[in-house]
Amino acid sequence: MKTLKGLLLLAILALTLNAGAQEVNVNITDNSNYSGLYEVNLYVIDTYTQNVCIVAQKKNQTGLQVPFSSNEISLSCVNLVSVQIDRYRYIANVAQQSASGSGQNWTPLLDTGEMWGNFDIYFTIN
């Protein structure tokens, strides 16, 4: 019984550590000489059902690198299905808050287990 409890505790700890490694970095290259603030919205799309939901948002960002850590990303609206099929992707939308420049880019397709990895999404606004 102690062995079973120990294994269960290790499994919970492993899941917690795995979830803690999740990070999506949005990297912006702005060639428009814009010096204002940015709004960055992070979405997940399920490419099988075409459901899209917002999982994180940051406004008033001054930097050209906007990180989203695991405690800022909520996948509760995604309804993840435990399959090893690449069906999800993160989509980031970047907008200049006081100008008309914007952009959108995404990660490669990911399976359920890959949703807790570290990803970089790059943009260029001209």
Image: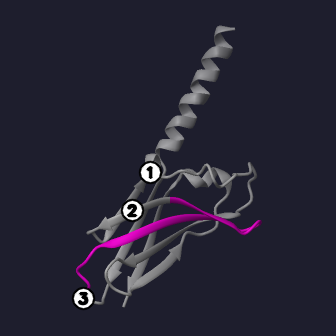
Disc number placed over residue 33 in the picture, else none: 3
Question: Could you tell which of marks 2 and 1 lies nearer the N-terminus?
Answer: 2
Residue hosting label 1 = 72
Closest to the observer: 98 or 28? Answer: 98
Q: Quadrant of the C terminus?
A: bottom left
Q: Secondary structure at mark 1?
A: helix
Quarter containing the N terminus: top right
CA distance for labels 2 and 3: 21 Å
Whether residue 125 appears in magenta in the rendering, the answer is: no
Coordinates of residue 16 in the picture (x, y in percent): 52, 35
Amino acid type, residue under disc 1 in the picture: Glu
State which region is magenta. Answer: 34-55
Q: Which tag is nearer the camera, tag 2 or tag 3?
A: 2
The CA span between labels 2 and 1 is 9 Å
Examine the rendered structure and indicate whether residue 48 appears above or below residue 3: below
User: Is the residue under label 1 in contact with that under label 2 (CB below 8 Å)?
Assistant: yes
Mark 2 lies on a secondary structure that is strand
Q: Which quadrant of the structure image shows residue 15?
A: top right
Dot 3: within a 10 Å radius of its alpha carbon, few (fewer than 14), some, or many (20 or more) residues? few
In three-dimensional space, the C-alpha distance between marks 3 and 1, rounded to whole angstroms, equals: 29 Å
Image spot of residue 115 (x, y percent): 59, 54
- Please name the residue that numbered disc 2 is placed on: 58
Q: Is residue 76 left or right of residue 16?
A: right
Q: Quadrant of residue 48?
A: bottom right
